[in-house]
Amino acid sequence: MKTYNVAILGATGAVGQEMIKILMERNFPIKELHLLASARSAGKKMWVNEKEYTVEETTENSFDGIDIVLGAAENDIAKKYLPIAVEKGAVVVDNSSAYRLDDNVPLVIPEVNPNDVKKHKGIIANPNCATIIALVALQPLHAYAHAKRMVVSTYQAVSGAGVGGIRELQQQVEAIHDNKPVEVKNFQYQIAYNLIPQIGGFNEEGYSSEEMKMQFEGRKIQSNPELSVNCTCVRVPVFRSHSESIMVEFEKPIDVEKAKVLLKDAAGVKLVDDPVNKVYPMPLDTTDQDLVYVGRIRKDMSGHENALSFWCCGDQVRKGAATNAVQIAELVIQNM
Amino acid sequence: MKTYNVAILGATGAVGQEMIKILMERNFPIKELHLLASARSAGKKMWVNEKEYTVEETTENSFDGIDIVLGAAENDIAKKYLPIAVEKGAVVVDNSSAYRLDDNVPLVIPEVNPNDVKKHKGIIANPNCATIIALVALQPLHAYAHAKRMVVSTYQAVSGAGVGGIRELQQQVEAIHDNKPVEVKNFQYQIAYNLIPQIGGFNEEGYSSEEMKMQFEGRKIQSNPELSVNCTCVRVPVFRSHSESIMVEFEKPIDVEKAKVLLKDAAGVKLVDDPVNKVYPMPLDTTDQDLVYVGRIRKDMSGHENALSFWCCGDQVRKGAATNAVQIAELVIQNM
């Protein structure tokens, strides 16, 4: 079996850590594993599959001899190092948003557009977490009835802000419990027992960058330039699964029963839909696994003939980021 | 000044307690105040404005000589006692859902349809909390451009399940912190760090009773039988303010600037909309006051010409229940 030299860029963050875990879980054929991070983390020891690794400082030379880079760093780090990695012959799967809308970079969800991987020129982008979760759920319905318009409200976990986001929710809950002042660092305001309707910055029309990703990335991933998305993104005090309330208007007729049949057999999806018996997706249940749970499927009652509503939840760190990236890397080596 | 004998039915619950507080805050002209509850609570002492009251067991005789009843009990208690109260000459403002869709019972939000109070035949119903918050926010826009279709996703606080709901979230957070088992009583599942997409039971089409209230009550309150609402109701780990993400399609054109001008001067609303400067409604900020905060107002980008999206938050126990009921009672005595 062929094996590959793999580097994780941003190996000490929440997504980088999860990428390592998932590479091991899925037995990715690794020859050498390199854990790259900032100078601050360099020298840290980490155990992966009972083997000790030392975190290396990222430099231009970090990518010599590397076959696959999984990028889990911020946009500025991605922009600085990934072109160097490509120049040195690596194929990069990048989780930042730096290259997602670049015409030369495929943006891939393996359950939706796996063949786009083949078009890469060195970099393949991993979509936004909320976009991945929505589009995995939507894909079987879209393939059948063609999605035209989506109205989406998200309920996004604090893990979206990384390890710091998770720690912040814990610390705030403890501070409130102990009657101490609440510290705010990663979010705009207290997130414990609160909701914050801001993820990212705002454009002139009043939409946040996170809200626009659903439309811009959705169009590219589905090769569906007409797709229009009205999205409201909200941070909620949940640790690591994103949930989404989605109304979709389709071009062709589709009923609830057909939607259930399609979702039941769809890749990456678990149909969890028997509300009378209290069976529906919840973020606690989707934590630490890779499927997007879909339920509460019902016909739109508000006047559009071919519209359905549903509710879906998925682990933001896994399928929303690390797992999707590793799945892309698996497609890459199939074609190497 | 004329004063009135007032009885609170269900005085020991979260809404009943808040009704007492708000009657005092707003200097409602009370002659005698009677606190009615179940036999279990009878005999309890309660201090209201430095005066001690004894909770009375509700019986058929509880309503003798009462002018105004504020109902904060469950549907079965409302159905049992409120007709008796009316027979004995009282006017009832009822917060249960027992009479809301009864043709003989006005369903009133004072900022929306105050004149409907005059049509009462003894009972006036207080709408569902999520419906009140949405329709107060919508009213100035609806009066200008006429709402036709709403797609709503709610983020509803645990206070919607009463004092027990609030206590349950606190106890679950503490149990998790102390590594003890989480107890579930008032909700279907753990609500701490989770979301539950169920409020009420489900109909055959898969909509929950809470989701249908927005359409059925909305049509009646707005006298807008054509209003169609696609609603998804979700319980979130927030203590006492409900939040809602709302897309509305209007009959007539309305732009964002016009909407802001209308909302700025509207009764019951506070415009909180400067996202670039991190100014938007959040449930923590709307707790313990009566205004519905509205912000994140923007043009729908998903294809409908006359559609806007917005985000609103309101205190579920106050404007969503107790304050609205006391406001109705104030309209009632104006007409007495």
Image (tube, coloured by chain):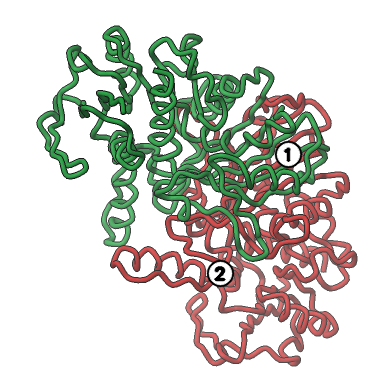
Chain colours: A red, B green
* Image-quadrant location for residue B330: top left
Residue A181 spot, x, y in % from top left? 37, 71
Q: Is residue A120 visible?
A: yes
Which amino acid, mark 1?
Pro
Q: Chain of mark 1?
A: A
Which residue is tagged 1? A140
Label 1: few (<14), some (14–19) or many (≥20) C-alpha neighbours in 10 Å:
many
Q: Quadrant of the N terminus of chain A?
A: bottom right
Which amino acid, mark 2?
Gly
Give left or right: position of B280 versus B249.
left
Give left or right: position of B197 versus A143.
left
Give left or right: position of A254 versus B124.
right
Nearer to the camera, A8 or A15: A15
Residue A145 spot, x, y in % from top left? 80, 33
Q: Residue at x 13, y 39 (%)?
A: B52
Q: Residue at x 26, y 9 (%)?
A: B88
Q: Residue at x 80, y 60 (%)?
A: A107
Measure the alpha-carbon separation of dots 1 and 2: 30 Å
Q: Nearer the viewer, mark 1 or mark 2?
A: 2
Which residue is tagged 2? A162
* Image-quadrant location for residue A20: bottom right
